[in-house]
Amino acid sequence: MEFKIREGKPEDIDLIFNFICELASYERLRDDVTATPELLNESLFVKKQAEVLIAEESGVAVGFALFFHNFSTFKGRACLYLEDIFIKPEFRGKGYGKLMLKELAKIAVKRDCDRFDWSVLDWNEPSIKFYKSLGAFPMDEWTVYRLTGEPLKKLAEL
């Protein structure tokens, strides 16, 4: 079996959308998905607000990673932020997730990023264990805050 990682292309948009839906179902958040293939295409390939890698085994897409740059004011450099990574359940345990993270780390180093960050749900023990085995550590002293929907619009109108 041949494994490879490639950049996502506009013709992958339905595949990317399906991976997002599969991930959302796994995370028990499927009802939160409001993205559409059209919106994703605009965001990823027209506005280039994020990038996608596709993992393939013998030409069959088995997973994806969606990432973008954020910025550290303290370091004065861009950082890489992994929004989502997903390997189909039937392809897990083959090291593909690790290879995807390795590829993302290479991108971060090549682009002179100061760090590589991502979030994980507190209940996702298998992923937490996996990430720690790679040397990643939780940022316990930080709490993520979010504005969305009406509170976001209300603040924007102030």
Image (spheres, rainbow, N blue to C red):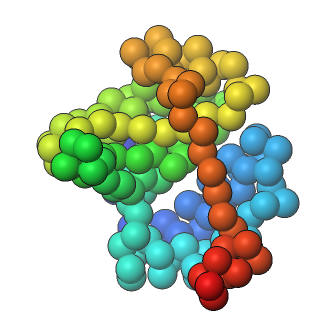
> Is residue 113 among what the camera can see?
no
Q: What residue is drawn where x is 63% and y is 88%?
A: 157
The C terminus, quarter of image: bottom right
Q: Would you say 125 lies left or right of 91 here?
A: right
As drawn, 125 above or below 97: above
The x and y percentages for residue 111 are 17, 48
As drawn, 52 above or below 129: below
The x and y percentages for residue 90 are 67, 31
As drawn, 134 above or below 39: above
State the image quarter where residue 63 is shown.
Answer: top right
The N terminus, quarter of image: top left
The x and y percentages for residue 25 are 79, 48
Residue 60 versus residue 31: which sits nearer the camera?
31
Residue 117 versus residue 96: which sits nearer the camera?
117
Q: What residue is drawn where x is 42% and y is 52%?
A: 67
Q: Residue furthest bottom?
A: 157
The x and y percentages for residue 85 are 53, 42
Q: Would you say 44 lies left or right of 91 here?
A: left
As drawn, 100 above or below 35: above
Q: What residue is drawn where x is 47% and y is 75%?
A: 43
Q: Would you say 126 lies left or right of 119 here?
A: right
Residue 43 versus residue 141: which sits nearer the camera?
141
Residue 112 versus residue 99: which sits nearer the camera?
112
**Number of numbered discs:** 0
Q: What residue is drawn where x is 30% and y is 48%?
A: 72
